Image (cartoon, rainbow, N blue to C red):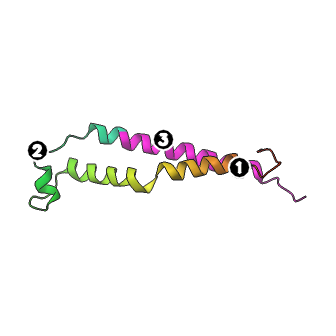
Amino acid sequence: MTDSSWDPAVRGVLGATARALKSIRGQWQEALALLPVSPDEDAMLEGLLPPDFATEARGLLECLLDSAISLGVIESLERTARYAAAGEEAS
């Protein structure tokens, strides 16, 4: 049997990271909900007009929510934090 004194600390870091990322995603979702859709958004997205702040911010937040911190990443962190090998209990 190997020394696993590091186990609770690593599990704690993984769990805390998952909680922090959920919080960040929540903040991004709240900010996205506050942003208005510009009546000229289609023209801005087609490059016919320069984007205004709301359109630029909406695009960034939508991209971040879709890819940067996906729910899959958070679920993987949570699952790994709870991981127990066959026949073992998670710490």
From which residue to which does the magenta span run? 1-29
Give the SS element for disc 1.
Answer: loop
Q: Are marks 1 and 2 in contact (CB under 8 Å)?
A: no
Please report whichever mark, 1 or 3, sits nearer to the chain's N-terminal start.
Answer: 3
Q: Residue furthest front?
A: 86
Instruction: Pinpoint residue 33: horizontal percent, then vertical percent.
Output: 30, 38
Instruction: Tell me which residue sits at (63%, 48%) in the image.
Output: 79
Instruction: Tell me which residue sits at (17%, 57%) in the image.
Output: 45
The residue labelled by disc 3 is: 23
In the picture, the disc for residue 39 is: 2
The residue labelled by disc 1 is: 83
Q: Residue furthest bottom?
A: 47
Q: Residue furthest right?
A: 1
Q: Are marks 1 and 3 in contact (CB under 8 Å)?
A: no
Is residue 11 within the magenta segment? Answer: yes
- Please name whichever residue, 80 or 51, is drawn nearer the observer in this view of the structure: 80
Of badges 1 and 2, nearer the viewer stands: 1
Q: Label 2 sits on what residue type?
A: Pro
Quadrant the C terminus occupies: top right
Alpha-carbon distance for marks 1 and 2?
49 Å
Alpha-carbon distance for marks 2 and 3?
31 Å
Instruction: Tell me which residue sits at (46%, 52%) in the image.
Output: 70
Is residue 14 within the magenta segment? Answer: yes
